[in-house]
Image: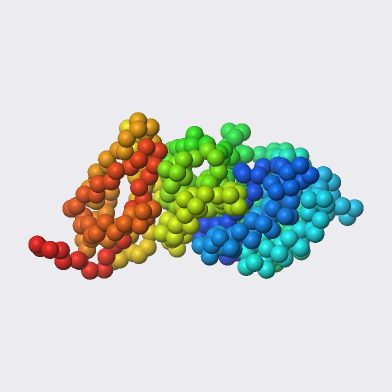
Amino acid sequence: MLTFVVFFIIIATSHSLDNGLARTPPMGWLAWQRFRCNTDCISDPDHCISEKLFMTMADRLVSDGYAAAGYKLISLDDCWLAKTRDKKGRLQPDHDRFPSGIKALADYIHAKGLRFGIYEDYGNYTCAGYPGILGHLETDAKTFAEWDVDYVKLDGCYAYPSQMDAGYPEFGYLLNKTGRQMIYSCSWPYYQLATSLQPDYKTIAKVCNLWRNFDDIDDSWESVQKIIDYYGDNQDELIPNAGPGHWNDPDMLIIGNFGLSYEQSRSQMAIWAILAAPLLMSVDLRTIRPEYRDILLNKYVIQVNQDPLGNQGRRVYKESGIEIWMKPVTPVINGKYSYAVAFLNRRTDGTPSEVSVGLKELGLNHEKGYKVLELFDKKDLGVKDPVDRVKVDVNPTGVVLLKFIALKHSVKRFGN
């Protein structure tokens, strides 16, 4: 029996990432953090989990410029389901909240030029108590393909983490077997880490397009900081497994909700860009304030996140509440990378902190020099050589995100 299980995993793994998807981190909109499991469409019709909500958010992605910036996914999360399967054992939506059915919702979203995502759970139930996929893996994979699903988020409540090493690859294999390309988002390592099991990241990266490692994000700066710490403290294990087609997922962007200040929102966006994290917003796009919308739509920060090299950045400095994070990006000139560099101020003492560092200290030694841009405020800081220093003032709980673009030719400066 053990031989069969090992053989099956090998077969499943060999097929799983032939989907050719998620060559850059997925971008889009997810319901969970902002709307949770609100199923009361009688008292709260504008905020409940319903086809109306997802159609409205799809409309907003297009009309408000998010789709043009790269946010192409609209995904269900928990609580879309009916409490029971249909007579043929297939999943079905709650008919009061999704009267048109899931295929019709997918068609609506596709007609907008967007991709459609769905949520399920590798367990007997979803986290909110709706039907899980155990015992129905092949049926559910076929159902998702028939509904023209583009993205599957598979949670791990009501399941044994010890069985996930076989279960997640099996479902990934069955998704690919349908012939429909579906991005596969896994919660596999999170549930194993929560029970003191060591995830096999090499296999996870072969099976899943993205995966969760840490706690669900909450609408608070404290939650964001815990995630940042986790990714910095565990970067040597996490970074080698990330790249085009397979990404570490630190969870949703909560920018524009209630828990983050303007500076903290910039900080989350910057660090998620450095981490090459999926950019999956969870916010009410109908009421988001313009300054937060501008953070989410900043094309220069998005370019860092979507850089084709697919490098996950790392924390290179941490002392006295100041952190420096760096990510190698394009263009690459004569073997020398360009870099995105985030200066993060974790202090709360009420005044900006000055950070001064030499380029050589950061490992920026390209002899032709670098053109330096500040990405949030869109400032050109001129050309810096390896012998130069860069100095920035970083607001409390805020960030300064710079891009050092490697030059093809030295720039002759006045006086030289």
State the image coordinates of residue 358 (x, y, percent, origin top left): 22, 48
Q: Name the residue located 66 percent from the left edge and 60 percent from the top edge.
A: 116
Residue 138 lies left or right of residue 15; in this view the side is right
Q: Nearer the viewer, residue 83 or 122?
A: 83
Q: Name the residue located 42 percent from the left edge and 56 percent from the top edge.
A: 301
Considering every residue shown, the one lying at the far left of the view is 415
State the image coordinates of residue 206 (x, y, percent, origin top left): 57, 55
Q: Is 168 situated above or below 215? A: below
Q: Is 232 situated above or below 307? A: above
Q: Is 83 situated above or below 174? A: above
Q: How is the image coloured?
A: rainbow
Considering every residue shown, the one lying at the far top of the view is 349
The answer to whether residue 88 is visible is yes
The C terminus appears in which quarter of the rendering?
Answer: bottom left
Q: Nearer the viewer, residue 355 or 168?
A: 355
The answer to whether residue 154 is visible is no
State the image coordinates of residue 179 (x, y, percent, origin top left): 70, 67
State the image coordinates of residue 245 (x, y, percent, origin top left): 54, 59
Q: Nearer the viewer, residue 161 or 372?
A: 372
| Count of marks, rendered view | 0
Q: Name the residue located 81 percent from the left edge and 56 percent from the top edge.
A: 99
Q: Name the residue located 30 percent from the left edge and 38 percent from the top edge.
A: 353
Residue 191 lies left or right of residue 238; in this view the side is right
